[in-house]
Amino acid sequence: MHKPLFQKTFITNRRFMAEPLNKPKRPPQIRTGLTDTGVKKAADKSARTRAREFALQALYQHLVGRNDADSIDAFTRDLVGFHKADSAHYDALLHGCIEGASALDAVITPLLDRPMAEISPVEHAVLWMGAYEFRQCLDVPYRVVINECIELAKAFGGTDGHKYVNGVLHKMAPSLRAAEVAADQTK
């Protein structure tokens, strides 16, 4: 006597569908720490990366809603997951970018191929953060600043916004971090 290869499964209107008895196993999932879109999963993010994400959201509120820094700060600190962020870095980015907005725009604008008004608020905020970190956060290597800004633009910006951010920040780095860029190019 042989074993049946299929089992009958009841479907509506008294019809049956053949279903294999031995279903093949799915291959095990490979855990890369990335989502389907290539962005880091929340568990794999550093405190500074989280701080940059919250700062970006706060700067977006400032650019779009014209809200003041203190109300944005209070709102952002109440968001889920903020306790995992580097609050000192968040404070520096948020308040430093808002207070130095005109100086940051003066650094960014000559590197753009269009007026600042045509840049999306997300890319504008990311460029502010990149320029601020180039100038004020000398403990962060310039390549890390560029990479973090690209990742923010990928996660929050338009389809190809990260490419634009990459180009602008690569033009900006030699003027704001000349020694570091020169040392990196001689390697």
Image (cartoon, rainbow, N blue to C red):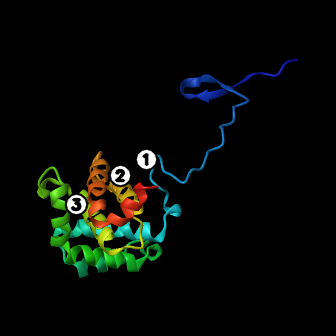
Please identify the residue farthest to the top as the structure is shown. Answer: 1
Residue type at mark 3 is: His
Residue type at mark 1 is: Thr
Q: Secondary structure at mark 1?
A: loop
Please tell me which residue is depicted at 36% across the width and 78% down the height of the picture.
Answer: 77
Q: What mark, if any, has residue 37 been given in the picture? A: 1
**Earlier residue among tags 3 and 1:** 1
Does the rendering let one see residue 151? yes
State the quadrant of the N terminus: top right
Q: Secondary structure at mark 2?
A: helix
Please tell me which residue is depicted at 33% across the width and 79% down the height of the picture.
Answer: 91
Q: Quadrant of residue 136?
A: bottom left
Q: Secondary structure at mark 3?
A: helix
Which residue in the protein does label 2 denote?
A: 154
Please identify the residue farthest to the front as the structure is shown. Answer: 186
Against 22, residue 94 (above or below) is below
Which is nearer the eye, 38 or 96? Answer: 96
Image x and y of residue 125, in percent: 25, 63
Which residue in the protein does label 3 denote?
A: 124
Mark 3 to mark 1: distance in Å?
22 Å
- Does 118 sit left or right of 46 as displayed? left
Image x and y of residue 135, in percent: 29, 71
Does the rendering let one see residue 78? no
Foreground mark, 3 or 1, reads 3
Mark 1 to mark 2: distance in Å?
9 Å
Please tell me which residue is depicted at 30% across the width and 48% down the height of the picture.
Answer: 163
Against 73, residue 30 (above or below) is above
Q: What mark, if any, has residue 114 been given in the picture? A: none
